[in-house]
Image (spheres, rainbow, N blue to C red):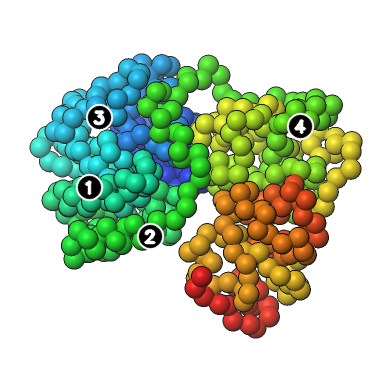
Amino acid sequence: MSPVEVVPLVDEGLGNSAYLLDLGDGRALVVDVSLDLRAASGAARRSGLRVAFAADTHLHADFLSGARQLSATEGTRVLASAAGHREFAHTGLHDGDEVDLGGLRLRALTTPGHTHEHLSFLLLDADRPVGVFTGGSLLVGAAARTDLVSPDRAEALARAQYASLRRLTELPDGVAVWPTHGAGSFCSAPPGAERTSTIGREKATNPLLRAPDEDAFVSALLGSLGTFPPYFRRLGEINRRGPAVLETSPVLAPLDVARVRASLADGARLIDVRPVERFAAAHVPGSLSIPLRPAFASWLGWLAPHDVPLVVLRDPGQDPAEIAWQATKIGYAGLAGELAGGIGAWDRPVSRTRVVGPGEVDRPVLDIRQASEFAAGHLPGARHIELGDLADRVGEVPAEPLVVMCGHGERAMGAASLLERDGHRDLAVLAGGPGDWSAATGQKLETGR
């Protein structure tokens, strides 16, 4: 058979990779594809392929699976763990089960850890192992977190993860490793890591695989876990039941200003996706700043309520389809629409937020980065509250002039918008991060927590 062609489909924002495998006969397999099927469908169409199989390695917590959508719209056969007890049509696989792909074969390997029902899929050409879709088990330079199913099961699943990784390392060194989670994923992967690897390379370089024993592995894995967005707690069960099948692509319906005002009065939230400087210059009071960028979905899922209607405010050049799809793929179905005409259509007073340069920090600092970022280097005396925790801890923030900061400014503006909604005034946002401040002032950063 000709060389196997596996095309990674990278979602830079969520830090994940889906995969498209050309089966050589006009059909394709996709692995861990999200409900936003634009990349997968486009890649298949360009190659003249029909997606015949969709395999999910686990019940995803960070995005809605697109497998059920493919099954409903294209007749795709869904492959997944029988232990996941999915409530929609699929082929439930147990350890060692194989699926004939037409020349190639897919063998299910139970690899619990990231989730209790996790499968890896070993791709075989005749009897030769070619590569393994490792999902959230073996990652490049890491292993996926084990606390998403339930915090009280984190250690038991970490011990299962240890055994699963040892099982995978029994494969030949030349076998390709195709993980789902990669750099930027809150499911745990080191920043800057490559997206794919080989068994041999991971055995030689992955720090977790070099742990001297199980206890050391568990301690290292659990010690590396940071926080994650609250929507992770909801999506696994939605994926088990089966995400609703979309009849049409999600859109942002235009809403006139009167309707937007009425919606906000009834409890809707306004999500302003414009760049930081545009939000700073003028924004609707009480709106939440989440700039549209690759990480938009993650921060929407972290900061915006999922159980109230959301109204979007964007600039004319920002793609409404991208906004709608990013929200939809993480389960935000309550998009009421967008303010037609943008900020120029708003006919009431606006709010403004000052942006300051690295050499203009003249007041107490609130650093809202992740704990690991803060520990690596922060301004002396800075107060620290992670952005994801801020909505529940606004009462801890003193009602005094503050500079809010992150690494670049996008997250800091989101934090400032939360504080402004809570009644804080005289806030400024730092344009840049701690390194910029140190370079501008000649002062050293503090480390540790």
* Helix, strand or loop under label 1: helix
Identify the residue under disc 2: 224
Specify the quadrant of the image occupied by residue 334.
top right
* Helix, strand or loop under label 3: helix
Q: CA distance from mark 3 to mark 4?
A: 43 Å
Sequence-wise, which precedes: disc 1 or disc 3?
3
The tag on residue 264 is 4
Q: Amino acid at mark 2?
A: Ser
Q: Residue at x 81, y 33 (%)?
A: 341
Which is more toward the observer, 32 or 318? 32
Do the numbered discs 2 and 1 sit on residues whose CB atoms are within 8 Å?
no
Sequence-wise, which precedes: disc 3 or disc 4?
3
Do the numbered discs 3 and 2 sit on residues whose CB atoms are within 8 Å?
no
Find residue 120 and report its horizontal and vertical position in percent.
Answer: 24, 39
Identify the residue under disc 3: 83
Q: CA distance from mark 1 to mark 3?
A: 15 Å
> Crowding near pointer 2: few (<14 within 10 Å), some, many (20+)?
some
Sequence-wise, which precedes: disc 3 or disc 2?
3
Q: Amino acid at mark 4?
A: Leu
Which is more toward the observer, 351 or 68? 351
Q: CA distance from mark 4 to mark 1?
A: 47 Å
Task: Say whether residue 203 is visible.
Answer: no
The tag on residue 160 is 1
